[in-house]
Image (cartoon, rainbow, N blue to C red):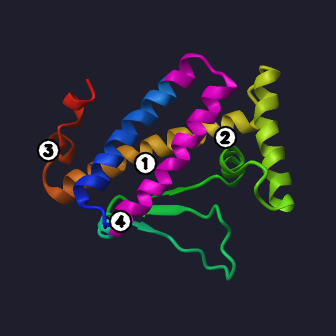
Amino acid sequence: MKAKTDGEVLLHFYTHSDFLEETWAEYKNSVTVLKALNLNIWTFASFIIYEDISRQLPNVIKRNKSDSEQPSEFEFEYTLKKADITIQAEPELFYVFSRIFEGKQIQKKVLGKQNHQFWELHKEFLEEDKGRMTLLLEDFAKKVIRFNNELELELIEYYGFNYRKRLNIDSAMR
């Protein structure tokens, strides 16, 4: 498999950050279950990009490894080196994320947790009640957007210029 270049990884990061912010604005404009699930997908997709950036630029961002002997599948935690800001995945929202992609193709034990969290979120929307899962999703999305903004500042400091402008993303998005 071909290794990704800095430009490819950063192009992916910048466009993803823009899409996440658009998804957040769309969600806040009219809150629906579909928009909530979409927002959850975009927030967790950020962690895949953080992994790529941490491999390419270990001086900017690092992945924190779990100390436990059996790390769980949702233990994603990243720290910005200079700003000392950390982001960690929310396990309950990860179950919702996994339920969307894996469906019934997984073990019954894990499927039970995923179904429970998925339907908890769905129930809150049906009852038009801003419950625990909805608040958790909104708070998590805000944290990821904030982390992306800080990471963008770290990248400007690392490169000495705004890589976003070099990639010419803003004009390409129009």
The image shows residue 56, relative to residue 86, as above or below, that is: below
The quadrant of the rendering that contains the N terminus is: bottom left
Q: Position of residue 96 (x, y in %)?
A: 70, 45
User: Circle 4 is placed at which residue position?
Assistant: 81
Closest to the observer: 23 or 145?
23
- The main secondary structure of the magenta stretch is helix
The image quadrant that residue 75 belongs to is bottom right
Three-letter code, disc 1: Phe
User: Circle 1 is placed at which residue position?
Assistant: 147
Question: Count the marks: how many?
Answer: 4
Residue at 31% in and 55% down: 9
Three-letter code, disc 4: Lys
Q: Secondary structure at mark 3?
A: helix
Q: Dot 3, how many residues are within 10 Å of its Cα: few (below 14), some (14-19), or many (20+)?
A: few
Q: Position of residue 119 (x, y in %)?
A: 81, 37
Q: Secondary structure at mark 2?
A: helix
The answer to if 33 sits in the magenta stretch is yes
Magenta range: 26-55
The image shows residue 68, relative to residue 154, as above or below, that is: below
Residue at 80% in and 59% down: 110
Residue at 49% in and 55% down: 47
Q: Dot 4, how many residues are within 10 Å of its Cα: few (below 14), some (14-19), or many (20+)?
A: some
Q: Are marks 3 and 2 in contact (CB under 8 Å)?
A: no
Q: Dot 1, how many residues are within 10 Å of its Cα: few (below 14), some (14-19), or many (20+)?
A: some
Three-letter code, disc 2: Leu
User: Circle 3 is placed at which residue position?
Assistant: 166
Query: Disc 3 vs disc 2: which is toward the camera?
Result: 3
Sequence-first tag of 1 and 2: 2
